[in-house]
Structures are given as C-alpha cells and as structure tokens.
Amino acid sequence: MTVMNYRKAIAEGIGRALRSDQRVVFLGEDVGAAGGAFKSTVGLYEEFGPDRVWDTPISEQAIVGAAMGAAMTGLRPIAEIMFTDFLGVCWDMVANQVAKARYMSGGQLEVPLVIRAHGGAGLGFGAQHSQTWENLLMSIPGIKVAAPSTPRDVIGLLAAAVADPDPVILLEHKALFDAKEDVPDEPFLEPLGSASIRRTGDDLTLVALSAMVPVAVQAAATLEAEHGISAEVIDLRSVTPTDTATLLQSVERTSRLMTVEENPRPCGWGAEIASIVAEEGFTFLDAPIQRVTSANVPVPFAANLEHATIPNADTVVKAVLSYS
Amino acid sequence: MNAAVSTDELTDWLRMMTLIRGFEERVKNLFSQGLVRGTTHLATGQEAVAVGASAALQPDDWVLGTYRGHHHALARGMSPASAFAEILGRSTGVCRGKGGSMHLTDVSHGVMGSYAIVGAHLPIAVGCAWSSKIQDLGRVAVCFFGDGTTTIGAFHEAVNLAAVWKLPAIFVCENNRYSEYTPIDQVSPVAHAAADRAAGYGIPGVVIDGNDVAAIRDAVDVAADRARRGAGPTIVEAETYRHGGHSRADPATYRPEQEVEHWLQRDPVAAVRRQLEATAEPGRAEQVETEASDQLDRALEEALAAPEPDLSTLTDDVYARAL
C-alpha cells in the first residue's frame, strides 16, 4: 500500500494502464510535457515518451474523434478533456459518434476508449469551468459513466474503464485533488456498475457521487454524533451502469432515501435513482424520497454565492433533520 | 487523362460505376414506392470519385464516408444485397437494420462507417490514421466529404491535427457545388472550398476533375504515397456534380438549367463507357451493363425477400454485453 492523493492517483492510474497494455495511448491538451493543467499527469511523458503520450492542439472534437478512430482500429486510447464543461465543445463526438457507433453498425464497430475530464464546483472557476455532467451523460445509451470519489477509485475505475470493450467517461472532481488514501501497489480494478458503501447505518440511506460522497459522510458523522441518527452512505461510483441492487438492499433496511447531488435539480442523476427506488422499492419506504441538489443556477463566481449553490454537510444535515 | 489505363481497368470501372448508378436508381424507386423510410441522399453523378479513389487504395486501407455514401461503400466491395437490405431496414442489412441509408458500414471491406453529422467523420478518420501510424500498419485512412463540410469546425480541427502529427490521412472533397441547397460560393469565401484551405495547414491541396476516374485515382495515389511515407495528409478536391437534389424528392429547382445541362454532358459513367468502347471489342460495354443490372436485380430481390429485424435484436449492440 502507498498513501496517495487523488491528483497523484490520476497519473498513477494512467501510468499503470500505459505500462500494462501496449495498446493504451494517452492524449489531451497540455497532458504531456506540461504535466497537465492541474498537474494531474506529471511524469507520464517522461516515462512513456511522445509515442504513448500525445499533446494535442486545443481541439476537443479532434481529441475525441482521434481517440474514437484509434479505438475502432485496435488501440485503447485515454483522452483527457481538461474541464468537464469542454465536453460541450465535442458533444457531437460524445453523444452522436462515440455512443452510437457500435449500435448503428450492427455491432461491427467497437469503441473501447476512455474519456477523462476534470469537473465540479467549489473552487472559484466560474460557470464555464465548474459543471458536473453525469446527469447529461447518463441519458445517452452506448456510453458508461463513472465518477470516482477517492484515490483508490480513481485508479481502480480507470483500470476497469481501459479494460472495458465500451466507451467509458470518467468524471474526476477538482475539489477532491488533495484527498488522500492508501492504494494497493499491485494491479487491481474497481468494477463499473458497483456502488460502494462508505458508512453503514440503519435510519436512512444517503446516496452520493464524486465530491458529494465526503459531504454525505461528514453529514452522517454529525447526524450520528449530534442527533443520534444513523445514516448509511452509498457512493454510487458509476451512474451507467447503475448498481440498483446495492441501493435497494440499503433502502430495504433503512426505509428512507435521500440523494446528495452536485447538479441542478431538474433531471439530476438523483431523479433517476429516486425513480428506480420508487418503482422497485416502494414498499420499503416509510417516507417520500428526498433530494438535496445544487441550486438551479449557473455556478456563480463569488465565494459565498458558489458555496451557497452546492450542497455541503450542513445543508444535508438540515435536510435530514427536517425529513426525519 | 493519364495514358496508363488498361482495357481491364476501364471494364472494372464501368462495371462498378454502372452498379452504383443502377443501385441509386433502384433506391430512388424504392423510396418513391414508400419502401425506404426517412431519407436518402443519392450519389448519382459522383460515382467517379469513389471508384477512382478506391482504385488507388489497398484492400486493408480504411475509408469513412457521409450520409451520401452508398457509392463509397459499394466501390469498396460492400455487397449490393446487404446494402439494399440495410436501406430497406431488413435483418440481412449490413448493419442488421440499425443504421439505414446514412450509416452503411462494412468493416470487412474497410468501410469504417458512414456518418450523418456533417464533418464528424474527419476527426474519426484522423484517429484511424493516427492508429495506423502508432501501430506502424502502413494503412491510410481516406475521408470522403462534401464541399459544405469545409465550413464546419470539425473539418479544421481534423485537418490541423492530421497535418501537425503528419498522419496518413487523405481528405477527399467531393465538391458538387452545393452545400445541401445553397451554392457553396455563397457560403465559402475561397474559390476551392477544400483545396484552398490546405495552405493554411501547410499541406498539399489539389483540385482535379472529379468526373475523371483516372485523374482521381492518380491524385489519391500520390496522396497515399505521401501518407505512407510519413509525410502527412493531403486534401484532394474533386469537382463533380450531383445529378439530383440534396435528398429524398428535392427537385433541385434552385439550380440553373444551363448548369445542370453542362454537367449532364460531362456524365462520368458515359465518359468511362466511351473510353471503353474506344479500346475494347464491340459489345463489352453492353455486356458489363447487363451483368451489373442483373446483379442488382438479384440483390434487390434477395433484400426484399429478407425479413425485418427480429424485435429481440432491439437492445443488441448498445453495449458489448447488455447492462
């Protein structure tokens, strides 16, 4: 085991993929010689060189398109989109091309690529550099979508994504870069579509994703210590596929469900989770499902406004207290 | 025209061009009869580009085309029966009825997809070329597109990346003078919508007669040689003409009659036929045409007899394995 932060785990995960599979290539803006806009890819260019690690022009359509063409012809590309928001620049590639090639070709084309992007609010980047788009991506059939909340999952989910025959989008969160954790030195993977129970509890289930996982864990600790409420925290980890079994088993025990989402409320990923539980676990519930979400606004710049936009442990605690 | 064209080559070219012409005529009829859903974009008049480019390629090279792409697929060897079946939405379609007219794909013949968002396949073709370079495969990726594609961003991102990475890509513009319904010179500020842009990316851009099979073959041959040497991509702009409208029943009344007449006089299929007649024994051209027509009739009969896709296949191939 080695203690590693989330930022370092990104480079570690990509390095492990490049080391273990010669088909893997890595491309993106400033990912090579510069070590990444967030220094999350430091050392890769030095170790693997320009034939494996490719600095691209500022051309998101070309980045994803090139990764797609390479994936269709025998390689396993990992493409970095610097900010999740920039997926908007290449939305056609993601939503119309990568996601649909296998289906439209009747299974002839395979697109085993990984697209990684840094997303999320809380750091003062403003409205065009702070979004989380798991909700948009999960509505597109043909792609898998995951969002690691810990260093171990950064490495493990990336390993699973690279090994997967389908296109996988991994959304990393900028606010988690300094989170530390022991990670195994030997190869491992965390399967896509498998949620992780971060804290066990009996009174209610909090389901969270990415940077909302530590928020939910912190809220659960406060609820236990100050209010005697025992909350279970499920880290969904991937939205496509969705681990409905873990969710339903938890709600069967706790009888209450609250989602903690960093996205505007309309059509957030939690709405789909609520729908699944309402349909398949209605009889488990003792109270209506609740959702804690970001405000339905573009992410504002001023610190107080931004912090008021996204859920934090206090807002989750308050929501639980008014719910219970 | 290049002198080095044998009678056998002319025979092959006429055979394929007649096949494409007859294929498109039958698709048009099927559409009129209500047997083809949605839309179709016929390549009638543009056959020479696909046939000429294919004549310069190796069997394992890759091509990527557009929603106006029946001719590219057929020229690379896609079976007319599976192409008809796909366009008719049948289970024996080359994409099992999941793609349709705009998405003909045949990986076994290097047809790595037909793409229906203008410009999207250029970056994807660049990715195929990048893959060839990384794996040292010696293959080239040819991307066919129309003049209207030169005004969308993906074109510029793709050509730039291919140029700066010196990738074995060939960008073949079929300039049929119309960006859907709008004359290209109304929406593009340069005389040659594709080739004039090449200078901006430091690569060769050549303009050729897109109705001259040999000229296209030679230009793509030069581009392929450059690509395989690691010298980078080329833009080949083939000036041609769409005999019909943009899609479906578009009568294309926005085009001047004189212009249409001028281009009909330069019909590429008739040109190859004349060349063949000048060198082959009498009756060769008629024989080729009859054989192509018979082949198409049999293919269409086979496709029409095929069942629709089984409903159980609806959720196949969204992912490698169902979630």
Image (cartoon, coloured by chain):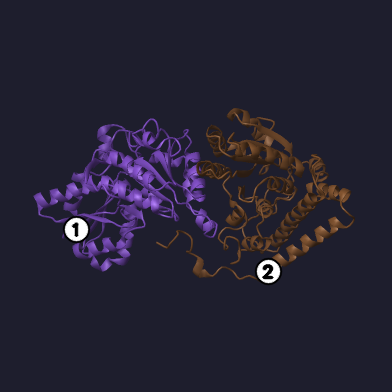
Chain colours: A purple, B brown
Depth check, front residue: A258 or A253: A253
Kind of residue sitting beneath label 2: Glu
Image quadrant assignment for residue A120: top left
Kindly indicate whether the residues beneath marks 2 and 1 are on one polypeptide chain: no
> What mark, if any, has residue B302 been given in the picture?
2
Reply above or below: B91 against B12: below
Q: Is residue A7 left or right of residue B161?
A: left
Q: Is residue B288 left or right of residue B235?
A: right
Image quadrant assignment for residue B256: top right
Depth check, front residue: A110 or B240: A110
| CB-based contact (under 8 Å), mark 2 and mark 1 | no
Kind of residue sitting beneath label 1: Leu
Q: Chain of mark 2?
A: B
* Visible residue check, residue A96: no
Q: Secondary structure at mark 2?
A: helix
**In percent of the image, x 69 and y 31: which residue is there?**
B191
**In percent of the image, x 70 and y 65: which residue is there?**
B299
**In percent of the image, x 87 and y 51: which residue is there?**
B277
Looking at the rendering, in which quadrant would you find the C terminus of chain A? bottom left
Depth check, front residue: A179 or B216: B216
Task: Residue A291 in the image: state x and y as whole percent.
Answer: 27, 53
Task: Residue A76 in the image: state x and y as whole percent.
Answer: 44, 48
Q: Is residue B42 left or right of residue A273?
A: right
Q: CA distance from mark 2 to mark 1?
A: 61 Å
Reply above or below: A201 against B46: below
Q: Give the residue pinned by disc 1.
A: A204
Task: Residue A193 in the image: state x and y as whole percent.
Answer: 33, 57
Task: Residue A113 in the image: state x and y as whole percent.
Answer: 44, 48
Q: Chain of mark 1?
A: A
Q: Secondary structure at mark 1?
A: strand
* Visible residue check, residue B181: yes
